[in-house]
Image (tube, grey):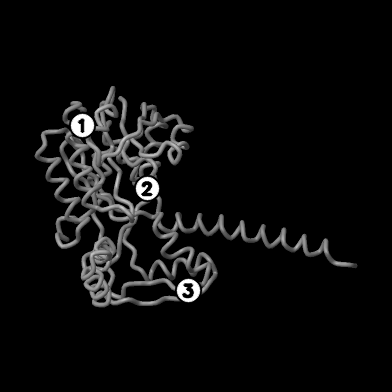
Amino acid sequence: MSILVVGGTGTLGRQIVRNALDEGFDVKCLVRNFQKAAFLREWGAKLVQANICGPKSLPPCFEDVTAVIDAATSRPKDSAYDVDWDGKLNLIKAALDAQVERYVFISILNSEKYPHVPLMDIKRCTEKFLEESGINYTILRPCGFLQGLIGQYAIPVLEKQAIWVMGEAAPIAYMNTQDIARFAVRALQVPETNKRSFPLAGTRAWGGYELVRLCERLSGEDAKVSTMSLDLLRGVRGFANFFQWGWQFADRLAFAEVGAGSDPLDADMNEVYSTFGLDPSETTTVEEYLGEYYSRILKKLKEMDFESGRESKKKLPF
């Protein structure tokens, strides 16, 4: 089977490419910039240059392709409506024209519950379009990426920077992108996943203050925590919406409300693991992920202090 991966340079996309190659698939990556995607070619993937916002550039990407894994999403500077809606419609239509056998789409858990949040509404509408298109699809709905915890919690603790926590925030069951990638690639190998949607949740849901305390314990440092209320977040969003230049910023703030809602972003995974034939004990836990990160970072800091001390001793006159 030859797979076309869309969004292969992203946090999740690169893990999908790596996993698919390890599983022996022929992998083709749709990219906008060959230079930024050079590492994918070094891994063994074939690169094809195109832009999902330009439908005429897409047909050549589907030559000899039997399946698509769509992990692309808009970047902060992009418009979600251009990339995540118009672009995805272009992509799905091109896949239909090319008669691909399977289409795996990465969505977001509970997107139907947040119609006022642009990205969530777009994800749900894309799911509906897929379901009605006639294509053989699998929709995966992760809660959040473990990788995002590094910039939000782990690094600020070490650098003694403020960590912003929503006081009323519901817990989130974060999952490692490597584990999500396993599900995405496995979906192509399991007929029972065809024309079905599945939640993807980590081993348990974590609240913001729980994550802060875990980072403190693993790093040996005290965190500086600042609390933001949901009302304040909505006020900032409303102000940004008043100005045209703030519309995209306001949309991002609206998405932040998802993690600040009252409903936990979590799901029962027993049936999912059974259907995919994957072992839940192999799923990375938050403790394991952050523990490994701090272990590497603290080791590196000790080595830097040691080297700095050696250099200082060389300069002593006695």
Left or right, 99 with reference to 228: left
Q: CA distance from mark 2 to mark 1?
A: 25 Å
Q: Quick one: SS at disc 2? A: helix
Amino acid type at circle 2 is Thr
> Is mark 3 in CB contact (under 8 Å) with mark 2?
no
Q: Which numbered disc flags the more N-terminal residue, 3 or 2?
A: 2
Q: Position of residue 211 (x, y in %)?
A: 40, 66
**In contact (CB < 8 Å): disc 2 and disc 1:** no
- In percent of width and height, residue 94 lies at 20, 32
Residue indicated by mark 3: 223
- Say which of 209 and 156 sits in front: 156
Q: Residue at x 23, y 32 (%)?
A: 56
Q: Residue furthest front?
A: 244
Is 96 left or right of 188, judged from the image as shown?
left
Q: Secondary structure at mark 3?
A: loop
Q: Residue at x 19, y 37 (%)?
A: 92
